[in-house]
Amino acid sequence: MHFFSLLMTVFVVHLYLQWTQNDLDAGLVVNFVFAWHTEKFLISTGVVVTLGLWLWALLGNIRWANALLLLSGGILGMATYEKMLQRNEPVYPSDLKMLTEATFLLEMLNGRALAALGLVLVLFLAFVFFSLRQSKSKKTVKLGWKARVLVFFATSIALGYAGQFQQEGNLLKKAYDRTAYWIPYSQQMNYYNTGFVAGFLYNLSAASMEMPTGYSKEKIDELKATYQQLADEVNAERTAALPETNIIYIMNESFADPLELEGLDLQSDPIPFTRALMETSYSGEMLSQGYGGGTANIEFEALTGFSMEPFAANITTPYTQFLSSQDDFPSVVSRLEAAGFRTTAIHPYNTTMYKRLENYETLGFDTFLYEDTMTNTDKLDTNPYISDAAAYSEILAILKASEEKDFVHLVTMQNHTPYQNKYTVLPSAAETGIASQTIRNYLQDLQYSDQALADLLGALQEWEEPTVVVFWGDHWPSVFGEDLYASNTIQNMHETPMFIYSNTEEVQKNLGITSPIYFFPEVLELSGSRVTAFEALLMALQEQVPAFEKTQYVNADTGEYVASRQGLSEQAKTLLADYDLIQYDTTTGDRYAEANGFFQMED
C-alpha cells in the first residue's frame, strides 16, 4: 500500500514535469506518455521511483518522502516553465547551483510565478502540520531500520550509477538509446524528444569535449608551427609589439536594437547615440549564444576566445561547470597582464553569480570590484540595480588612478530583468507606439544606457591616454513575448549591436555579423599590435566563418546562415577542426598548447 502511494506520487510528479516542460500543453503530455515515447517514459519513471525509495529510506517515513518529492517536483516544474518562457531553454543540472542565489531568483519572478510558488509552499506546510499531528497519534507509517539500510545502500548505488549517465557503456543510457534520438545541439528539442528526466540526465557532468580525431602532442606542436608562421606574416606588417592603449570591455546587459524587430511598430529610437557611433567605428552585430539569458557564456567567449559551439551538449555554463576549478586559464586577461596591463573586472552585483569571484581569479584579473566594493553605486528611479552611468564612473575612476595601461572589463546590471515597475517615468505609448508598460520600461532602460554611453565616450574623448572600448549587448531580453519572437528569425533574435571605439582615431569598418571570440583580434588590428599563434588562428577562422554557435554558422562565401558545419567550405571545416584541437587541449586535454607557447608572443 505504501509503495503504491510512492508510485502514484512519482507518476504525478513525472507528468507534471512533462507538462511544465511542454508549455502546459496536456495533449503533448498524453501523446508523449501513451503514444510516442512510452518506453522512455517508463524508464524515466523508474529513475524517479529510485529517487523516491532513496528518500523513503533516508527519512524512514513514506509521507515525508512523498511530500519532498511533491515539493521538489513542484518547484522544479515551475523553474522549468519559467526558464522555457524566458529563455527557451529547459532546466539543466548545472542550474541547481543557482539555488545559492535564491534571493536573486525570486527577484526575477513575476507575480504569477510568485503566487504559484507561494501556493506550493502553503500546501507543503499544511502537509507538514498534518504529518506532525499523525505522528503524535502514532498513525504514521515508518520503515524498519534494517529495510532502511538495505534500501538506502541499494538506491544510493543506483542513483550514483545514473549520475554517470554520460560515461561510456552506461547501461541506463543504453536502455534509453534503444528508442531515444538525442539532439546534442538543441537541448530544447532534446528534452522534448526524450522527456524531462532523460534530458536532465543527458546534461549531467562529463568531459567538456570529446577528443577530436588526431589529438596528440605532436599534432598540437604542428599547429603551433603552422599558425606561428601565419602570425609572423601578420606581425611583419604591424609596428606595435603590444597594444599601447587602455582597453575597456563593456558587456551591456540585454542591450539590443528593437528597431531590428519585425512586427514591432516602434515610433522612436531608444539608442540614437549608439546607432550614430556605429556608423563611424568598427561595428556590426554580435551573434549571441543566448536569448533571454546566458550572459556568462557570452562573457566566457569574449574573454577566452573559445566558443560554446565545440563543447559537449552537457556543457551549458563553463563558469559553473569547469572553469572555476582550474588554477589558471589562457585568456585576454592573462595575455594583457603579461604585457604589463593592470586588469580589473567590474560587476555591479554580488560575487557569487556564476562563481565570478573564482572565475575572475582563474582568468587572471588583478582586481574584482562588485556592489560592496565599488565607489559609484547610484541607481535610477526605482530600478533595483546599479546604473550604467555609475558603472561607467567606476571605469573613469580606475583610469584616473592608474599609472599603468589598463584593461577594464565591465558586466553591467541596469537593464536586467524584471522589467515591471522599474521606472515611475516612462516614454509614453503615444511617443513609442507601444502600449505595454513592461516593454516601455525596457525602452527606458535602453535610453538611459545610450545616454550613459554618450557621457562615457565624451569623457574618454577628452582623456589624454589612448583608449579602446569594445561594447556589445550580451543577448536579447524576452520582454517582447512569444508572438514577436515567432515573427522574427531565430538568427535575428540572437544578434545584438557591437562596436569598437578609439579615442585617438576614427576608423570605420563593417564587421557584419561576428562572434565574441573575434573581439580581441579586432582590437589588435585597430591598435596595430602583433598577434600570437592563437590569435592568428582566430583571424584565419574569422575569414571563413565570421560568426558561429550551435546550429548557426555564417558562411563567409555567401554571407548566409547555415545550420551545421556541413554547409561550410572545406577550408572552413579544416580551420574549425584545428580550432577544436586547441580548445580540447586547453579545456579537457593535456594543455600542450600552453607549454609550446601557442598563446604567447614570441620574442
Image (cartoon, rainbow, N blue to C red):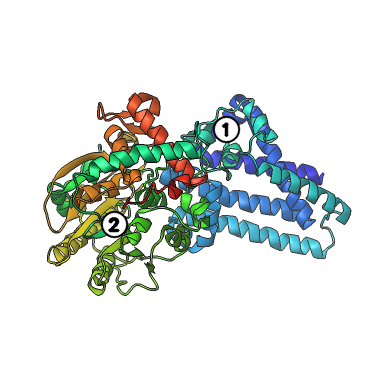
Front in this rendered view, residue 325 or 436: 325
Q: Nearer the viewer, residue 427 or 384?
A: 384
Residue where numbered disc 1 is placed: 194
- Whether residue 49 appears in this view of the structure is yes
**Most foreground residue, 504 or 13:** 504
Q: Residue at x 54, y 58 (%)?
A: 99
Relative placement, left or right, of 52 versus 19 is: right
Ranked by sequence position, the earlier of labels 2 and 1 is: 1
Residue type marked 2:
Tyr
Query: What residue do we see at 79% from left, 46% from top?
Result: 154
Q: Hey, what amino acid is under mark 1?
A: Thr
Q: On screen, 395 above or below 545?
A: below
Instruction: Kindly identify which residue carries mark 2.
Output: 249
**Which residue sits at x=25%, y=53%?**
471
SS for tag 1?
A: helix
Residue 273 as seen in the image, left or right of residue 81: left
Left or right side of 406 for 183:
right
303 or 521, nearer to the observer: 521
- Which quadrant would residue 87 be assigned to in this image? top left
Residue that appears at 30% across and 44% down: 518
Residue 263 at x, y percent in the picture: 25, 37
User: Residue 47 at x, y = what percent?
Assistant: 69, 40
